[in-house]
Amino acid sequence: MSKLTSKRITRRGFLGGVAMAGVAGAGLMQAGCASGDSGGSGSSATVEGGTLNISLASSPAYLDPAKYTGVYESQIINNVCDTVVQYSMDLSEIVPALATEWTVSEDGATYTFTLRDDVVFQAGEYQDGRAMTAEDIKYSLERSANDSAMNRLDMLDHCNVISDTEIECVLTSPNSSFLTALTDAGNAIVPQEEVEGWGDSFGEHLVGTGPFRMVQFTRDQQTELARNDAYWGEKPNLDGVIFKVITDATQSANALFTGDVDMVTDLKGESLQTVQGDSNYVVDQMDGLNIAYIYMNMVNGPTADQRVRKAILMAVNREDLIAAGYPYGGASEATLPLPKGSWGYDAAVEDTVPVYDPEGARELLAEAGYPDGFSLKYYTSNTTQRLDVATVFQQQLKENLNVDVEINTNDWGAFSEIAAAGQADIYAMGWSWYPDPYFFLNKLFASSEIGALGNGAGFNDPEVDDLLQQALEVTDQDARADLYKQALAKIVEKDPMLVYATEEVCTGLTQGVQGYVQRADQLVYVVNSEVNMSKSA
Amino acid sequence: MAKTILKRVLQAIPVLFVVITATFILTRMVPGDPAITMLGPQASPDAVAELREQLGLNEPMWKQYIDYLLGVLQGDFGWSTSYNGDVMPLILSRLPATLSITMTGLIIAALVGIPIGVESALHQNSILDYVFMVVALVGVSMPIFWLGLMLVLTFSVNLGLLPAMGMGTFSNGVWDVVSHMILPVFCLATIPAATLARISRSSMLDTIGTDYIKSLRSRGIKETLVIWKHAFKNALPPIVTVLGLQIASAFTGAILTETIFSWPGLGTLIVNAVNGRDYSLIQGTVLFTAVVFVVINLVVDIIYAVINPRVSYEGGGQN
């Protein structure tokens, strides 16, 4: 990903919809300790009280749900606020949160939710902890749909309040990704009085209905949360949580060693190795919900010819790209344009991806009319990691196909403009989003996305478009998964991109941290319907 | 003297004008659209266009420039998009944190570096001189980032004596504040101390070799007086110049040091401003730093006149 600095880079997008150029990893394939309870022994009795210190690799700036941009901000929002529905911790299904149940109209365009009747907001400056009702859902969701620049709910047309505990959400057109969008911290439910009372500084005084309330936000230092005693769910074990900003990766590991933090999110590079090497600490690793890839121009230049694209796929050894991009580990090999953690993933399609075969690649290229190679312009963002991967790609194409690759690295903004405009022969980045395949397959391969960064290569296949559209209109998740699997197979048949890695979500923990559950989307839930973290001395 | 100061202040105006103009142009030459940067790669083109409009980025460049210039003249340095506040109060709110470590670091650097340099000069070619100068060479050559991490590894991780990061608060006691400052201050003091030691040594060597010092000694004047009252005073101008430069570059050092130690000062502000393509904040911090440079230069010049009467700014040169 790479936008901004390397920190922002990495995880910038994600929930808010971010594509990361560099990011990491896919699915729930579990490596290392994998998910599940981790941290300390796990066998001791739950400890109540204490404050959990968690490091964040970037400094949160926008904590107003409608304005947040990075996953490090959503970590805080998710522990202060609730969403209407949420993903289960293993990301396999949507489960109740503020809504206890919901129905979808036959045309798939209207969702009706039944809400909990025991939810109150945390007391704030402009309200004293009043009950949360359907009016608040309407306000928050319409605010996200209409007033937020982040486009996290652009499928919503309007909401109709039926009663205090019932609400109907009407979409602009049938869109099954609606429930997934509702799980985003950007669509968290907030009280109108506080939003309007604080105005632009609402984020610094965030109020929601979640397990913790914000006590103090100190920009570039820390955000302090305390238990919300009026929380509707299980009483949080912890007295509080402090999110500390530690932007330097080495220092985040040091903070774990010195006890400044109990938990390090986004552990990577050499620090990952350092923490792994110390048996006093636990490293939770699992494939993230992301892919790193090299996308080839489908419209212009030599790569418009599928034989050329296939030859390129066959000429590159993924293991070498991963070794270059992730010298300290933290990534696993990926081949499909959908992370393994997504419920639309189909392992059977992996076999249809061309394997490394330089000899065959040369023959194919000769057949395509380029026996002596050609030259290509390769664009990527200017991070060391992206450049290292590009260099190995360049070497292998030269060696195996006599293709000259000219590497162009740019700042994220400039890179994304070039890539989106279809001006690159090849562009390399990462993509990270929700478990719903819509956020990968539609965004990367639907013809309607041509001109946006996702489909800057100009992938255009009516059959694929048709499958993707159907999958958006059907509401049953299993039926949708089948359609996405078909679309995935059709996409891979066209050899559009070289997917090479999925970055892992790596979290470092002290032995005292109990009940932490790692998620492929890298979100940290301290307390929700499935978890209630605690900390022993 | 008052006339000199006024003259120098007036001379600073064109300098600051050039700084404002250059910063304005440079920030806009850096690739990356602030709107795209703020909204993330998935933002729709409509949302980006809307934000550009809000930020005034659709105005012609000359108009943005004139607006900014007029604002600065009226004391309005713009609105920080990433911090959601007026630029100047933001900078001023971060200044104490930065000054607390940079100035402490420089005072310590001067107190340690200058005496070491003078001692080395007085014992030229002795073991002591060699040891001091090798240490100073190492100090000058040390990358500040590496030094910071090594300090943390040694004093925080391995020995557990000092906090690895963050800023203390007085509500937790004075030691909390002091202990958090030690490593960043050490980090910031090392290079200036080494530089000052080297310049003090060479400047003192030049001075004590002069005829008038020899004649003072031949008249039997007490050695301490000769050294500190006469020789050192004459050796001071280059030391003051270097000290002035070190103050200015301490702000640069603060960027790295604050990043390592999660210190919430100007350094982290600048880093976040650049990362967020926060034009107003970048311009504000650069302009602020430029003013600091100009003021320090002025102060150094005035100190020159005080410590060395041969320097006169009024008479049009030395006499």
Image (cartoon, rainbow, N blue to C red):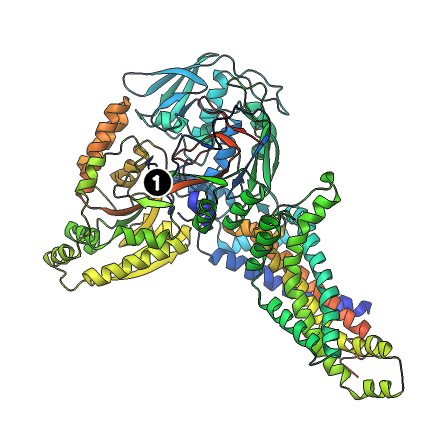
Of the pair B304 and A151, the residue shown nearer to us: B304
Name the one closer to the observer, A36 or B41: A36
Residue depicted at 18% across the width and 44% down the height = A494
Q: Out of B299 and A491, give the one closest to the viewer.
A: A491
B177 shown above or below B318: above
The residue under the point 40% across, 27% down is: A89
x then y, percent, for residue A345: 26, 34
Lateral position of residue A26 relative to residue A348, left or right: right
Count of marks overlaid on the render: 1
| B258 over A406 or under it: above or below | above
Q: Specify the quadrant of the image occupied by residue A59.
A: top right
The reply, left or right, for residue A497 in relation to residue B74 is left
Q: Position of residue B293 (x, y in %)?
A: 66, 63
Residue B82 visible, this angle: no
Tell whether A223 sits left or right of A477.
right
Q: Nearer the viewer, residue A275 or A434?
A: A275
Rendered-image quadrant of the C terminus of chain A: top right
| x then y, percent, for residue A287 | 35, 39
Chain of the residue that carries numbered disc 1 in the rendered image: A
Q: Residue type at mark 1: give it.
A: Asn
B305 over A529 or under it: above or below: below
Q: Position of residue A104 (x, y in %)?
A: 32, 17
Q: Which residue position is annotated with label 1?
A: A290
Can residue B302 be seen here? yes
Tell me the crowding category of disc 1: few under 14, some 14 to 19, or many 20 or more residues within 10 angstroms, Cα based.
many
- Single out the residue that lies furthest toward the top: A163
- The picture quadrant where one finds residue A244 is top right
